[in-house]
Amino acid sequence: MSANGRIASPGLEEHRLDLAKRAYDHTFRIDPIIRSLLDTDFYKLLMLQMILKKHPRTKVTFSLINRTRSIRIAEEIDEGELRRQLDHARTLRLTQQEITYLRGNTFYGRLAMFTPDTIEWFSKFRLPEYELTKEDGQFTLRFHGLWAETSLWEVPALSIINELRARTALKTMSRFELDILYSRGKAKLWSKVERLRAIRDRGPLTLGDFGTRRRHGFLWQKWCCEALMEGLGASFNGTSNVRLAMELGLEAIGTNAHELPMVYAALAEDDVALKNSRYKVLEDWNEIYAPGLKILLPDAYGTTSFLTEAPAWVASWSGARPDSKDPITAGDELIQWWARNGENPEEKLIILSDGLDIDSIEHTATYFRNRVRLAYGWGTNFTNDFAGCAATDHPGLKSISLVCKAVEANGRPTVKLSDNPLKATGPADEVERYRRIFGTAGMAPHDVKV
C-alpha cells in the first residue's frame, strides 16, 4: 500500500521505469523482444493494404543487408538466441484489443482507415518461415513468400537483431554500470530535448519518432517517446510504432517506403514500363489514400530524374520525404519544382528522416523556415544513441546501418539506385541497366552512417 492509500503495482512499474534493472534481468529462458505484431512501423500497414488490393499473389523475397561491414554481427549475437527470438515472433497473432484499435481508431483524420478485408486478413496472420545461415561473420537472413506476408518481417527482424546486439553489450556490465549507462543516456537525450525546445521557440517544430527499426530496445524507445511527450508537448506529433501509439495515446505516423517502387520496377515488362513504374506506384496509392498520406518518396531511382519526368498531377501531392540526398539540396530542389508547376511551396510538407541528429535538425529548421512546412522523422539517433555513455566502449552499443530490403519479386531481382550511390542495392549488371534507363543526375556519394 502506498502512502496515499492506493495499491501499488511494483513489478510493472519498476520494470517500466528502471531500465537498468530490466536490462540486468535478461536471464530468463526467453525474454521476448517482439511481443506484438503491432510492434512495427505504421507505413507497413498502409503498404500492406495496397499490396493486398493490387498485388495479392506477388511473391517477394526480403533479405537482411548489413551496410556496416566492419561489424561482424554473427560474431556478436548467438545464433540460437536469434532463432528463439525469430521463432517467438512467429507465434504472435493480433489480440482482440489490437483488432479493435485498428478497426475503430482514427488515423490521419480518417475513421476506418483499414478496410474490413484488410482487418480480416491481418487478424489471421502469422509471420512466415525464415531462412537463416552464416557467412564471413554476417547472418544471411531471408524471407520468401507472398509480398503481403514477407513485408511484415522487415521491422521485427531488424528490431530483434539490434536489440540482441545491445543485450550482448549489456551482459558485460554490472548492475551499477547499467544504472550509470541509462542515467547518462537519459541526460544525453534530455539535452537534445532542450535544444529542440529552443528551435521550437524560434518557429514551428513538428517532430515524430521513426526509431523502431534500429532502436536500442522497445522499453528504451518507449521512454524516449515519453520524454518527448513531456518535453515538447504538441510539437511531438507521434510515433511510427503502432503499438507505442496505441499504448501512449499518440498519433501513428508514416506513409510509404522504397519497397513499393522497387517491387513495381522489378515487375515491369520492358524499359518503358520500368521508367513509368515509379509513377504507377503513385496512381495505385492515390486510389486508396487521402491527401494527408500523399507524400512522395522520390529517391529510389534518383530525385532529379523523378521530378524532371513526373506527370503534372504528381506536383499536386501534399509533400515529399527526401531520403538519401543532402537535405538542403533536396529541399531546394523540391521547392523549385513545386514553384515551376504552379504550386505554393509554403503549403507543401517536407519530411526529413535520413540519419537526423540534433545539429542537422537545427540547421534545416533555420534554413527552411517560412519557405515550406517542415517535419522530422527522428530515427536511430533518437532511439539508439549511447555514444559516450558507457565506461567502456562496446560495439553492441553503437548503431549500425542495418536494413532489410526486398531483393526479388516474382523471381526477378530488385534494384535501388538511391540519390546516394553507396546505398545502391541489386546485382551489378541490373544496377548498371537501371542507371542507363533512369540516369544518374543529382546523385552524389556520402558516408552512410545509419
Image (cartoon, rainbow, N blue to C red):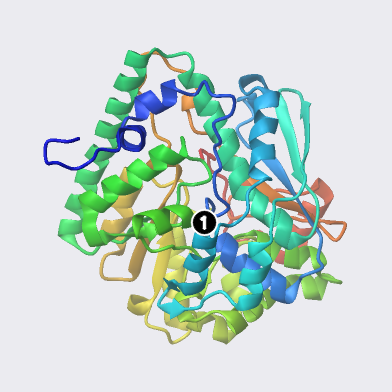
Front-lying residue, 353 or 124: 124
Secondary structure at numbered mark 1: loop
Q: Residue furthest left?
A: 4
Q: How many marks?
A: 1
Residue 253 at what x, y percent from top left? Answer: 44, 63
Q: Is residue 345 visible?
A: yes
Q: Residue at x 47, y 81 (%)?
A: 291
**What residue would you read off at disc 1?**
323
Q: 448 above or below 82?
A: below
**Which image quadrant: the N terminus?**
top left
Q: Could you say which quadrant of the image residue 115 lies in?
A: bottom right
Residue 113 at what x, y percent from top left? Answer: 52, 76
Front-lying residue, 312 or 391: 391
Q: Residue at x 67, y 38 (%)?
A: 86
Residue 37 at what x, y percent from top left? Answer: 58, 53
Q: 420 above or below 164?
A: below
Q: Could you say which quadrant of the image residue 236 lies in?
A: bottom left
* 64 sits to left or right of 106: right
Q: Could you say which quadrant of the image residue 367 lies in?
A: bottom left
Q: Residue at x 65, y 70 (%)?
A: 120
Q: Is residue 422 visible?
A: no
Residue 267 at what x, y percent from top left? Answer: 81, 67
Name the amino acid, label 1.
Asp
Q: Residue at x 68, y 56 (%)?
A: 151
| Crowd rating for badge 1 (residues with CA inside 10 Å; few <14, some 14–19, many 20+) | many
* 360 sits to left or right of 98: left
* 114 sits to left or right of 229: right
